Amino acid sequence: MTLRLTMTACFLSEQRAAEYATLGFRFERMERAPDSPFGSTPMYYEPEPAEDPTVEFESLDELMAFVRRWGRCVLFDDRIEVYNGYRE
């Protein structure tokens, strides 16, 4: 089964962006303003992709291994979302 892959988080640290890049996500660096209440460390965000990365599972065991590796996931008919952030 091949599913489109998405994620909840919009902004990530450099380290987390590098981890998610292994799944096929692309990130762009965003500098923060020096007076940002969140600090001055640059963040990385995923621009709207032309096409979502995909992931293939041959068995339920492979799907469960993916969830163990990446944490909470939400499964839809045509995609799996790595729930790595917060949304309303």
Image (cartoon, helix red, strand yellow):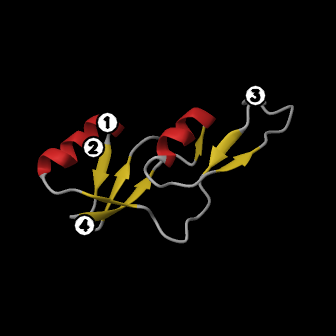
Mark 2 vs 4, N-terminal side: 2
Whole-number angstrom distance, CA of label 2 to CA of label 4: 17 Å
State the image coordinates of residue 27 (x, y, percent, origin top left). Answer: 61, 51
Asked if residue 88 lies left or right of residue 75, the reply is right
The answer to whether the residues at label 1 and label 2 have Cβ atoms under 8 Å apart is: yes
The Cα–Cα distance between marks 4 and 3, rounded to whole angstroms, is 39 Å
Find the distance from the CA under tag 1 to the CA under tag 4: 21 Å
Q: Position of residue 20 (x, y in %)?
A: 48, 44
Indicate which disc, 4 or 3, sits on the residue closer to the N terminus: 3
Under mark 3, the amino acid is Gly
Q: Which residue is mark 1?
A: 69
Q: Which residue is mark 4?
A: 77
In the image, farthest residue toward the right: 34
Q: Which mark is residue 39?
A: 3
Residue 71 appears in the rendering: no
Give the crowd class for mark 3: few <14, some 14-19, many >=20 residues within 10 Å.
few
Other residues around mark 2 within 10 Å, as few (<14) / some (14–19) / many (≥20): some
Q: Nearer the viewer, mark 2 or mark 4?
A: 2
Gap in angstroms between the C-alphas marked 2 and 3: 32 Å
Left or right: residue 82 compared with residue 9 = left
The secondary structure type at the circle numbered 2 is helix
Q: Quadrant of residue 32?
A: top right
| Above or below, comparing residue 39 to residue 82 in the picture | above
How many circles with numbers are drawn on the protein? 4
Crowd class of label 4 (few under 14; some 14 to 19; many from 20; radius 10 Å): few
Q: Is residue 40 left or right of residue 46?
A: right
